[in-house]
Amino acid sequence: MKKIISTLFCIIPIIAVLAQGNVYKQEPTKFEGLAMTPPMGWNSWNTFETHIDEKLVKETADIMVASGMKDAGYTYIVLDDGWMTRERDIDGNLVPDPEKFPNGMKALIDYVHSKGLKFGLYNCAGTKTCAGYPGTRGYEYQDARFYASLGIDFLKYDWCNTEGITAKEAYTTMSNALKKAGKPIVFSLCEWGDNDPWEWAEPVGNLWRISGDIYPCFDCEYKHPENWSSWGFMKIVEMRKGIRKYSGPDHWNDFDMLEVGNGMTAAEDRSHFTMWSLMASPLIAGNDFRSMSEETLSILTNKDMIAINQDKLGIQGFKYSAEDGIEVWVKPLSDGDWAVTFLNRSDAEKKINFDWAKHIIKDDLSGLTADFSNIAYTIKNIWKNKKASTTKKAFKDKIASHDVVALRLTKKK
C-alpha cells in the first residue's frame, strides 16, 4: 500500500505540470472604436464576383468622390474574393494577381487613400476562399502582417472550407493577429450567422453577417445548383429573431451588402435602403457605379435616410405592427426623434390611415417611448422630402406594392 501511495504522490505533480499547458484561454482583442456608426462603402462581389481589376477600383473611387457618395458618407472600397493568385508564393505569402493589378496592390491602395477613401480586402477563415483562392487557415499572423504592410483599413473574413475548426476560435485568432500586426483594421465577420456570432463576436470584430448571401429581390429565396440559397432582402430582415439587442456602436448586425441598383424596381430599392437604415446595418453598396442611374444615386445618397442609419444611439429598429399587408417599423433616434416606416408587403396598392393618438410606441430594449397622446411631433416624409403636418392628426397616404413611406418624427418645441 505504501508503494502505491508513494507512486501516486510522484505521478500527481507530473499531471499538474502537464495540465498547466491547457489553462491558457485565447482572448479576443479587436481594435476598438473603428465603427461607432455602421460602416458605409462599396464592395465588388454583388456585381463583379471575381472579375475585378485595378481599372474598376480606380473608376469606382473616382465616381464615389465626383458623384457625392463620399460626401454622403461612403468611405470604404472593399475588394472581395479573387484579388490574389491561385497559390501563395514560396514563402507562403499571398500574392495580388499581377494581371488584374499590374501596378501592385500597394499602389492601388495609395490611390484610393489619395481620394480620401479607405480600402478593404477579403479573405476566408478556411483553407480556400469561397471561389477557391488561398484561404488564411494556418497563415493568420502572416496574412495580418501583410495586410498591415499594405495599409488596408477593412478586412472581410469569410467562412468557406472551414471543416474541423470552430467559428469563435477561428475569428478570435484572426482578430488577435490583426491587433498584433498593429495597423487598425475594421474586422468584418462574414460567418453567415450559422454559429450565432452576435452572442460572442462583440470583442472579436466590428460587424458580423447574420445570414447567407443576399439576392436582388423583395422576399424570394434563390436556390443555387450547389444546394445553397441566397435571400431576398425582406427574407434577411425577418430571418433572425431577438438579435437586435446585440447590435450597437462598434458591434453591428450586418444584413449583407446592398442590392440597390441591381435589377429590382425603384420601390423595392427604396424599401431595401430604408430597411437597412432602420436595422442600423452597414450600408455597403454592391452595384456598378459606372452605369448607375440618377434614381439609384438619389436613393443611395438620401441624406435623411442615411442620418437614420448613422444615428449616434445605434439602436436597431423593430417591427411595431402588421395589418392587411402593411407593416409599421420603427427606430428610436437621438434627441427624442423616431423613424417610422410603413412598408407594403402586398402585391397591391394600399391606403395608410394611422391615428397617432391611438398608439404608444415603446422600445423595451432602450426603454424609450413615443406617447403620441401626450407629445406632438412634427413629421418629415423622407422620400418625398417634405413636411407632413404633425402627429396631432392621423397620417394618411397611399403606398404602392413593395414600397415604403418613411417618416422622421421630431418633438415639437
Image (spheres, grey):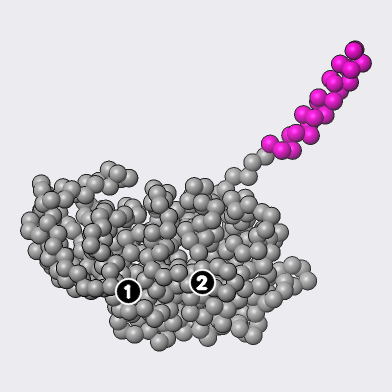
Decide: few, some or many residues near mark 2? Use Cα within 10 Å; few <14, some 14-19, many ≥20: few
**Which mark is on residue 138?**
none
Quadrant for residue 13, please give it: top right
| Residue holding disc 2 | 223
Looking at the image, residue 108 sits to the left or right of residue 10; the answer is left
Regarding residue 43, the answer to whether it shows in the image is no
What secondary structure is marked by label 1? helix
Among numbered discs 1 and 2, the one appearing first in the sequence: 2
**Which mark is on residue 268?**
1
Where is residue 308 shown, x and y percent of the image?
A: 29, 61
Q: State whether the magenta stretch is mostly helix, strand or loop.
A: helix
Residue that appears at 28% across and 73% down: 347
Q: Nearer the viewer, residue 325 or 391?
A: 325
> Magenta residues, as a range?
1-23
Quadrant for residue 64, please give it: bottom left
Where is residue 262 shown, x and y percent of the image?
A: 41, 79
